[in-house]
Amino acid sequence: GVLSADPRRVPSAYAVAEVSYNEAMELAYFGAKVIHPKTMQPAISSNPQIPIFIRNTFNPKFRGTRIFTSSVTNMQNDSCVCGFSSIDHMALINVEGSGLIGVQGVAKRLFGTLESLGINVVLISQASSEHSITFATDEDSAEPARQAIQAEFQKELDQNRISNIDVNFPCSIIAAVGDGMKDVTGVSGRFFTALGDAQINVFAIAQGCSERNISSVVATSQSTRALRALHAAFRLSHTTVRVGVVGMTEYGESLLRLLEVQRRHLWDAFEIDLQVCTVAIDSHDTDIFRLKNENGDDSITLAAIREATKTSPERSDSKISFAFEASATGEIVKSSHGDLKPLLENLFRVDCAHHVIFDCTNDKEASVYHPEWLNAGVNVVTANVTGISGSKEIRDAIHAAETARGKLSAQYLREVTVCGGLPVISTIRTLLNSGDKIRRVDGIMSVAMSYIMFRVSPPPEIARSGKFDEECTKGAFHGDIGNGIGKACSFSQAVKEAVAMDLTEKDVSHDLSNEYAACVLMVLAKELGLDRNVTTEEIQKKSEKVVDLPDGKIMDHRVFEGTIDDMIQARVAAAAERGCVLRHVGSVDVATQSVEIKVVEVPNTHVFAVTPPSCECVRFFTHRHNPYPLVIQGPAAGADCTSSALLAELLNMMRSKVGPRMGILSRSNSSAFLT
């Protein structure tokens, strides 16, 4: 039958059930080789007109394509185009000069010269300024055409009335064809937006008043990528996003499983195919896996990684709640490397418009590659705070990369670097973009310190909150406050529990020394424009520590037993006498240009006091939110929360490029869909 695109270049192309005579003529002219335009003329001229059927000799039961007066296209946005065609081995010739403006007979002389040589002109484009005339012809005719035009207009060239005659090749003409494009607004906008999102440069454009065909000239090296982007943009196929994952940590495994679980749902709802093509186990001295068949629809799964690395499923399954059926989809190939440099080579394909890398580590060895990935046109979704809070050099490199090409630049999505899945960075940007002025941002921003400080200094009668939640949700959410968590314990016991729950870094000193909290505040300072005069090291150095730490790594909670436990207990008791509890609070004050981390006494009824353990709480003091601050509070720990937030970042970006299908409504960001 007549296919929606060349299947050799667009694997998801399909046979169109019905096309009109006019659509078939356009498709045949622009490269569809199943039928020649002249062979349809007798059927069109007949009275009554005769339908034409294109069938498969080797599959006679398949319906094929019916060519007649009607078409599958209509005046709806999702079905106004029936297919795309392309012509390769073309050359674009541009005749330009001020002497062309308002001069009669220039076009006649130009195309008369081409006619005398028997050169066929495939496409013509001229702006209303008449400053230039552009046309396309086949590559073999380009040089004879240039020489003939130069000879014809030699006088104008000598007088500088024609400035130059340029030849650009190799080029390809991409054409969108459909009767339904007529009277449908936004078709051209979608056409060129798709090319822009795919970073395709358009050399020339042509469209007739019949509005049945939109043609553009692009570089041949980008033609396959352009075809695939357009085919997906007009709902003739799905949009493929090639995905790379760095770090098979608890978060990385949860993300890989989530991508597998949601792949079919996102395909059905948004026609987005998230294809995991490469996975790096770690950020350095690591094994990197890639798909063996890079041209198929396979995706790397968690089961395949576990099978290749001989990892036990019990290691992390108890902490990941996404339900799925384990399956090793697609063969994978392993290679060992000292760094992440080969990851980009495994991921990037010229014929794919969208690439993304998820950084699930917290390593500087990974964040140093963020600018390189961005400059290559790969979007980066990161939970790794060490890049955007790192040295001035790496921060400037990331900023330069994400703004290098304006709106066409790859995006650096970093919401998860601050408070996990809580929308802190997006809230700051929303407030500032709407004209509000942020005076101060403060809160409990370290999940490890949130848990530890709550356990050593819980507010009185906090267990009643857990019982209330259990009653009002009929047992669906009961929390853990009523299970002994609401009773105070020693500092060493709190650290032991936090380590057992994977709330801390492997080296507990990173949390207790405020290293992680300083990185988070540095990210907030950057969003608020205060990062020029402060560094993460300065924030950490000036911060107030809960305890004085011994030298070296801290891998055992028992180093805090005895003197340190007694000291913390005495401080908690003193605060309790004043009706307060101890909390670990970070703040960025715009008015005073200060960034601080302190252990403060807050009243028992304060929002910081009643923030549950392993939850984070951020307050925004703004010009409009007065006298009470805007508060964001919620759980930020756990693999599921983090991986869900990482995926949500990508979907928010892709939704602006794709959007849900017609007839499907997404309610806010929930998983409920109406069909």
Image: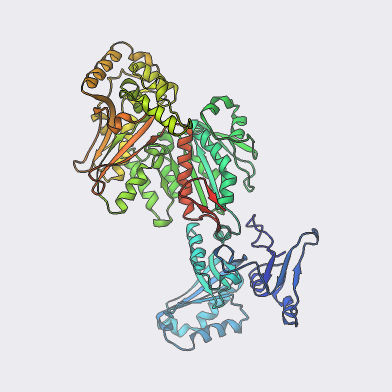
Residue 325: percent from left, percent from top: 63, 35
Q: Looking at the image, which residue sits at the far bottom?
A: 104
- Lateral position of residue 162 relative to residue 88, left or right: left
Nearest the eye: 169 or 58: 58
User: In the rendered picture of this protein, how many numbered marks are placed on residues?
Assistant: 0
What residue lies at 51% left-to-right and 44% top-to-bottom?
A: 344
Nearest the eye: 536 or 93: 536
Is residue 415 placed above or below 432 in the rendered structure?
Answer: above
Query: Quarter of the image holding residue 275?
Result: top right
Q: Looking at the image, which residue sits at the far top?
A: 562
Is residue 51 placed above or below 369 in the rendered structure?
Answer: below
- Lateral position of residue 576 relative to residue 379, left or right: left
Query: From this viewpoint, is residue 311 visible?
Result: no
Query: From this viewpoint, is residue 495 visible?
Result: yes
Query: Quarter of the image holding residue 451?
Result: top left
Viewport quadrant of the N terminus: bottom right
What residue lies at 34% left-to-right and 25% top-to-bottom?
A: 462
Residue 96: percent from left, percent from top: 44, 77
- Lateral position of residue 293 relative to residue 434, left or right: right
